[in-house]
Amino acid sequence: MIPVILCGGTGSRLWPLSREAYPKQFLNLAGSHTMLQATALRLHGLENVQAPILVCNENHRFAAAEQLQEIDRAAQAILLEPCARNTAPAIALAALAAAESGDDPLLLVLPADHVVADTTAFQAAIASARPLAEDGHLVTFGIVPSSPETGYGYIRSGDAVGGGWKVAEFVEKPDLATAERYLASGEYNWNSGMFLFRATRYLEELGHHHPDMLEACRTAFAGAARDLDFTRIDADAFARCPSDSVDYAVMEKTESAAVVPMQAGWSDVGSWSALWELAERDENDNLLRGDVIAESAAGCLVHGGERLVGILGVQDLVVVDTDDALMVAHKDRVQEVKTIVQRLKQGARSEAENHRKVFRPWGYYDSIDAGPRFQVKRIVVKPGCQLSLQMHHHRAEHWIVVRGTAMVTRGEDKLLLSENESTYIPLGVVHRLENPGSIPLELIEVQSGSYLGEDDIVRIEDQYGRN
């Protein structure tokens, strides 16, 4: 069995903590690990399981690889989607990669951004589903509902088969009255978006119900290229692939769908209210994280950042504070947070995509201050890493080392700078920053010039394959 971890998605309903460049699957929201790391770790103990295949956005490749390294887990393949085409093509790419070995493995498809509180129950459900999948069924896992939830799709169970039931019907998110009726009937489970099936069976069903999608995926995978530890899917071919979910493209059409119930403390953490429901709260039903003072407040979620947050005389509010954005919403309206993100995109605001702290494969930078013709950044470079060899058309830079050792390429010169030493990079001069030491290199960069955007970078050489 090969786990397939789907690592796409933007988590826009968890803005401003989750953003396009660093979405919720890479965040620590519900435990001591990020959601991606928790997904990989809960596989430990399953029998006959190979290393996972990750399918992720090309822009997230280094974050995904690094987070697995941090927990001493490795992927057998990291497939890079050049553009978003939903879950059906993503799973097809993974199935094609898994079939390369000549075997016909079971694929355990798992979103990277879900919470599962009970790993034992999770693994028991997979064990129950395995014989069904080995017999050719396409198995989905139905979460036993604990409430009449209107934010999830539902699966109606039909006749018993093996350790589960045939799928009688997939239904869309219901209104409250319908959800209450589903719950009372005992015939319905929440649609988890987790699946188990043979690679060839999925490809057969996709080819039968959506042949143009399968052909586009085959062409895109055939044109893939290796890049470091990644597999770059052919961009032009994949762009021609139709976009659809696995539910619509395959599961709702196949005659071989089966559902196995799972009762494992599952949540897709699809909103701030879902996170509030999951977490342990104080005596006033508040979930408070960070430096927060709550007085005469009840039922609130406050996620503080670097500064003190105080709430007084309020209830059922969600307050999320980050370095560059503050979001306040009523808990009943948090499903609509994505409308704020849409407004940001319409206004070409950077807060829709990037945090103030931006992660790169070599470390990160934090934009501390900015004004007309200047910008100040704190840059941290991991030991042994280097930035690209580059130049700028519109800005000059001053670098001041505050911790560690910097190897600086500046034109024809190479400089070794220690703590409290600095250098100046004139406009147009080719330069590079490296950390030759064993501790993180931290420096302050002061940019000055007529244009300070990140697109004013001409990369001459880059070990990470960026343009």
Image (cartoon, rainbow, N blue to C red):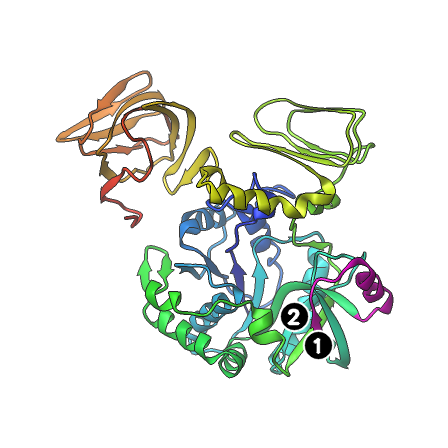
Residue type highlighted by circle 2 = Thr
Disc 1 target residue: 167
Point 46% across, 59% down: residue:
84
Of the two numbered discs 1 and 2 on the same chain, state the one appearing first in sequence: 2
Residue 359 vs 75, above or below: the answer is above
Point 47% across, 78% down: residue:
103
Residue type highlighted by circle 1 = Val
Asked which quadrant contains residue 141, the reply is bottom right
x, y (%) of residue 281?
77, 37
Residue 306 visible (yes or no): yes
Point 55% across, 49% down: residue:
25
Q: Which is more foreground, mark 1 or mark 2?
A: 1
Point 84% across, 68% down: residue:
186
Quarter of the picture containing the N terminus is bottom right
Secondary structure category for the residue under label 1: strand
Q: Is residue 232 left or right of residue 60?
A: left
Residue 173 falls within the magenta-colored stretch: yes
Start and end of the magenta stretch? Answer: 167-187
Front residue of 389/184: it is: 184
x, y (%) of residue 340?
57, 42
Asked which quadrant contains residue 381, the reply is top left
x, y (%) of residue 276?
72, 42
Secondary structure category for the residue under label 2: strand
Do residues under tags 1 and 2 come within 8 Å of each other at their CB atoms? Answer: yes
Disc 2 target residue: 140
Q: Is residue 188 left or right of residue 248?
A: right
Residue 145 falls within the magenta-colored stretch: no
x, y (%) of residue 249?
55, 73
